[in-house]
Image (cartoon, rainbow, N blue to C red):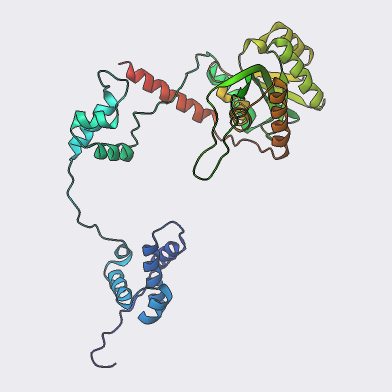
C-alpha cells in the first residue's frame, strides 16, 4: 500500500440491509438524495471504487467517502438527514391549542364563522401564522357542506337492499336506477359567449331569456353505465308511466327488472302501482327518505348538467332537447359504470358518526 493512503472501509451488508437499500433505490417517491445515498452504499458493498461510484452516481469523491463513513457508523439510519437547528418556536403548544379551541368551540359575537383576520385579532397571533396553523390542522371555518339525515324507520333495511343490488346484482335480471330531472330550463344568453383563450376563461353573460322547460327521465344501468333517456314537456305520473313503457320495450322480456326509485309522489301513484302489478317482472326498491344519493342516476344528472346544460345557450326547448339527446347518444358509445365501493356497513357507520356529532353539539 502506498505511504499515506487511508485504507478503504469494507462494507458488508446483511440481507435485511440489502433488501431495504434496494427498495429505496427503486422507489419513485422517496427524495432523490436518499436514493443516491442508497445507491452509493450498494455499489460500495459490491466492491466499486470511490472514483467509479462518483462517476456513476454523479457526486463528488468526498461525498462518496462521507456517506460510506456515515453508513459504517450508523448503518441504515445514517442515510437519513439528522435534525437541524432552526429558529425556536414563537408559539408554544398551549397557545396553539387555545387558537384551535377558539375556532372549533366558539363563534364570533356578530358572525357565523371565524376568519383568519378575526382569529388573529382574537388570539394576537399574526394572520400568516394563523393561516399556517389552519392548513396544518385542516381547519376550514370558511367552508360548510350540507347534509340531511334520513328519518325513514326502515333506513337500514333499504340501504342494505339497494347497496346489495349494486355490489351483488341478481342473476337473469337488470338493475336500473331511475329518476327524472325536472324543470330543465332552455336559457338563451343575451349576448354571445366569449371564447376560451390563453390566460382567460370562457365568458358567459349573467342574464338570459327563458324559453320554457323540459323534464328528463333517465334510467342508468349500473353494470354497464349505459343510459336510457326521454325528454317530456311535463312531470306527471302519465309521463313517468310512458317512460316505464319505454323501458319495458327496450329491456329483453326474459329479464327481471329491479328499479331503484326515490319517494317522489309520481313513483307511487295508484296508476303506476297498478301498471307494476300487471308486470310482475318489475321489482321496485325505494331509497330511504332524504337519501336520493343512493340512486346512482343522480350522479349522472350531475354529469349532464355540467357538460351539456349549465353553460349552454338554447333558443328553444327543442334545441335543448336535441342537445340532451346528442349527449346521451355519445355518452353511451363509451359508457363505463360508476365505481361503487361503499358497503352498507360503511354507510351506516358514517351516518352513525354524523348522528353522534349532532347529538354532541346539543349538549
- Rendered residue at 22%/32% (across/down): 120
Vertical order, 108 against 267 (above or below): below
Q: Quadrant of the C terminus?
A: top left
Vertical order, 64 against 106 (above or below): below
Residue 48 appears in the rendering: no
Residue 73: image location, x then y, percent: 26, 70
Residue 263: image location, x then y, percent: 61, 14
Farthest residue in the front direction?
191
Q: Nearer the viewer, residue 130 or 214?
A: 214
User: How many numbered discs sit on the rendered protein?
Assistant: 0
Q: Nearer the viewer, residue 225 or 161?
A: 225
Farthest residue in the top direction?
270
Where residue 90 sits, quadrant-wise, is: top left
Q: Nearer the viewer, residue 143 or 322?
A: 322
Residue 164: image location, x then y, percent: 61, 28
Horizontally, residue 127 falls left or right of residue 187, namely: left
- Rendered residue at 73%/27% (across/down): 322
Where residue 331 sits, quadrant-wise, is: top right
Q: Nearer the viewer, residue 183 or 51?
A: 183
Residue 355 appears in the rendering: yes
- Rendered residue at 20%/30% (across/down): 121
Q: Quadrant of the N terminus?
A: bottom left
Horizontally, residue 75 falls left or right of residue 28, namely: left
Vertical order, 195 against 186 (above or below): below
Where residue 358 sits, quadrant-wise, is: top left
Amino acid at each position: 500500500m502506498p505511504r499515506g493512503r487511508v485504507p478503504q472501509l469494507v462494507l458488508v451488508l446483511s440481507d435485511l440491509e440489502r433488501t431495504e437499500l434496494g427498495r429505496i433505490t427503486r422507489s419513485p417517491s422517496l427524495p432523490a438524495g436518499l436514493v443516491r445515498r442508497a445507491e452509493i452504499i450498494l455499489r460500495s458493498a459490491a466492491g466499486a471504487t470511490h472514483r467509479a461510484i462518483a462517476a456513476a452516481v454523479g457526486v463528488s469523491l468526498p461525498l462518496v467517502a462521507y456517506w460510506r463513513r456515515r453508513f459504517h457508523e450508523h448503518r441504515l439510519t445514517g442515510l437519513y438527514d439528522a435534525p437541524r437547528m432552526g429558529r425556536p418556536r414563537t408559539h408554544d403548544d398551549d397557545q396553539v391549542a387555545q387558537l384551535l379551541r377558539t375556532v372549533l368551540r366558539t363563534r364570533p359575537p356578530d358572525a357565523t364563522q371565524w376568519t383568519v383576520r378575526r382569529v388573529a385579532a382574537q388570539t394576537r397571533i399574526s394572520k400568516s401564522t394563523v393561516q399556517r396553523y389552519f392548513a396544518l390542522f385542516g381547519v376550514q371555518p370558511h367552508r360548510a357542506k350540507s347534509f340531511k339525515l334520513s328519518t325513514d324507520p326502515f333506513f337500514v333495511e333499504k340501504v342494505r337492499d339497494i347497496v346489495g343490488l349494486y355490489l351483488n346484482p341478481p342473476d337473469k335480471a337488470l338493475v336500473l336506477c331511475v329518476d327524472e330531472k325536472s324543470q330543465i330550463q332552455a336559457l338563451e344568453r343575451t349576448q354571445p359567449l366569449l371564447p376560451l383563450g390563453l390566460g382567460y376563461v370562457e365568458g358567459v353573460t349573467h342574464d338570459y331569456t327563458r324559453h320554457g322547460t323540459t323534464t328528463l327521465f333517465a334510467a342508468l344501468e349500473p353494470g354497464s353505465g349505459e343510459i336510457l333517456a326521454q325528454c317530456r314537456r311535463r312531470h306527471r305520473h302519465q309521463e313517468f308511466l310512458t317512460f316505464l313503457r319505454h323501458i319495458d320495450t327496450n329491456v329483453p322480456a326474459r329479464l327481471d327488472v329491479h328499479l331503484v326509485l326515490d319517494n317522489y309522489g309520481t313513483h307511487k301513484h295508484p296508476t303506476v302501482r297498478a301498471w307494476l302489478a300487471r308486470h310482475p317482472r318489475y321489482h321496485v326498491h325505494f331509497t330511504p327518505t332524504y337519501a336520493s344519493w343512493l340512486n346512482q342516476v343522480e350522479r349522472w344528472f350531475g354529469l349532464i348538467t355540467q357538460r351539456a346544460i349549465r353553460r349552454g345557450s338554447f333558443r328553444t326547448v327543442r334545441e335543448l332537447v336535441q342537445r340532451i339527446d346528442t349527449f346521451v347518444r355519445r355518452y353511451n358509445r363509451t359508457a363505463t359504470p360508476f365505481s361503487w365501493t361503499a358497503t352498507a356497513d360503511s354507510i351506516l357507520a358514517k351516518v352513525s358518526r354524523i348522528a353522534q356529532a349532532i347529538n354532541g353539539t346539543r349538549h
